[in-house]
Image: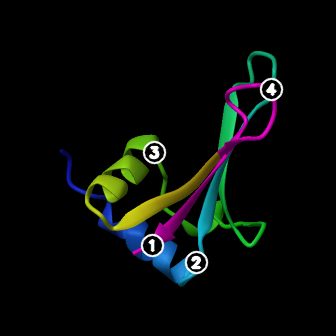
Amino acid sequence: MSTPNLPLLEALRAAAGDRPFVVVTEWLGYLPYGVYSWIEVDGVDITSALPEVKGEDLAGLVAAGLIEEVDHRQTSDDEHDTKTTYRIR
């Protein structure tokens, strides 16, 4: 297992506090545009307040028990359109 991205965790704590945050992914449906993702708290995009976020960063924080996934939903017929809710432990 890789080392958890602690600077990301601290930035999430600063931006979200004790509120859940949601990772939103959306497929635009055509190339050259692909899957876009961003992070929201209470419906507000906080991505610019965070260091670069990779999928493995969140997986590492979950594996280390520092955040937990509380919900995952597909938001359309496209498998890439999702909302995954996390809470900082």
Q: Nearer the viewer, residue 42 or 9?
A: 42
Amino acid type at mark 1: Ile
Instruction: Compare residues 79 and 7 and report the one nearer the observer.
Output: 79
Range shown magenta: 73-89
Are the residues flagged by discs 2 and 4 in contact, CB closer than 8 Å? no
Q: In the image, is 27 to the left or to the right of 72?
A: right
Q: First in sequence, mark 1 or 3: give its number.
A: 3
Rendered residue at 78%/67% (across/down): 43
Q: Residues within 10 Å of mark 1 (few under 14, many from 20)?
A: some
Q: Which residue is mark 1?
A: 88
Which residue in the structure is indicated by mark 3?
Answer: 54
Please identify the quadrant where the C terminus is shown: bottom left
Q: Quadrant of residue 6?
A: bottom left
- Indicate whether 82 appears above or below 18: above
Between the C-alphas of marks 4 and 3, the distance is 24 Å
Q: Quadrant of the N terminus?
A: top left
Model colouring: rainbow
Is 63 one of the magenta-colored residues?
no
Mark 2, residue position: 16
Identified by mark 2, the residue type is Ala
Q: Residues within 10 Å of mark 2 (few under 14, many from 20)?
A: some
Q: Find out whether the residues at labels 1 and 4 contact each other: C-beta distance under 8 Å.
A: no
Name the foreground residue: 70 vs 55: 70
**Residues tagged 3 and 2 counted as in contact (Cβ below 8 A):** no
Amino acid of disc 4 = Asp
Question: What percent of the width, then of the height, locates residue 58?
Answer: 42, 52
